[in-house]
Amino acid sequence: MDIGEIIRERRKGLGVTQTELACRLGISRNQVSNLETGKSLPSSKVLSALEEALETSFDELLSSDDPSPVVWLKRSRASTDRAAEARGRQRGVDEERLAAGPGQRLSPVRVRLAPRARWEAGPDMQDCSEHFVYVVCGAVEGLADGRWLTLGRRHAMYIRGQGPAVWRNPGEETAVMLWIGGE
């Protein structure tokens, strides 16, 4: 079971409607539906509220039988640079820089791409000597050596040296990828 199925099963077990859960979480009923169907993932704030609303623990919510590894990174409190803000204003693109752990020389970015949207890594990201991409949901394509490489849900790619700086969502559903660059 994935986290959406766990949320739905727990909610129904408590006899709570999506509307009631939405009120408890401070989100819309549609957002609850998106969480349960896997169309979106809960933020850390919603995860915390889910613990109380569903009378469960964080560990139980994340006790998925999904074999893919889970990586947690904190959101950066630092303001994003102007180039990142401009890229984030591209139609259908939501880019969020994340903070790496202390002493780590990583540049983690969560990128949400609407259907047919395109994202370009900024110059500061392109200078990284190593890249790692993990697709959380949907599918993405990265432009490398003049051709598009496709990664689907739960697929990952490690690149040593210059990696794809242009990514797009070829599908009809929102795609979310975690892009990490390092020295």
Image (cartoon, rainbow, N blue to C red):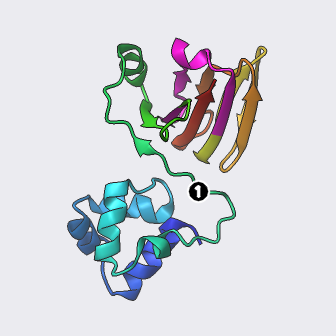
Q: Is residue 152 magenta?
A: no
The residue at which mark 1 appears reads as 70
Q: Does residue 139 appear anywhere in the picture? A: no
Q: Residues within 10 Å of mark 1 (few under 14, many from 20)?
A: few
Picture residue at 51% right of the left edge, 68% below the top? 62
Answer with left or right where residue 165 lies relative to residue 62.
Answer: right
Amino acid marked by disc 1: Val
Would you identify the image quadrant in which residue 118 lies?
top right
Give the position of the N terminus as an image quadrant. bottom right
**Residue situated in front as seen by the camera: 51 or 146:** 51
Picture residue at 34% right of the left edge, 87% below the top? 14
Q: Does residue 108 appear anywhere in the picture? A: yes
Residue 124 spot, x, y in % from top left: 52, 15
The total of numbered circles placed on residues is: 1
Residue 88 spot, x, y in % from top left: 40, 24
Q: Is residue 9 above or below residue 42?
A: below
Picture residue at 48% right of the left edge, 54% below the top? 39
Would you identify the image quadrant in which residue 53 lies?
bottom left
Residue 37 spot, x, y in % from top left: 49, 63
Residue extent of the magenta highlight: 107-133
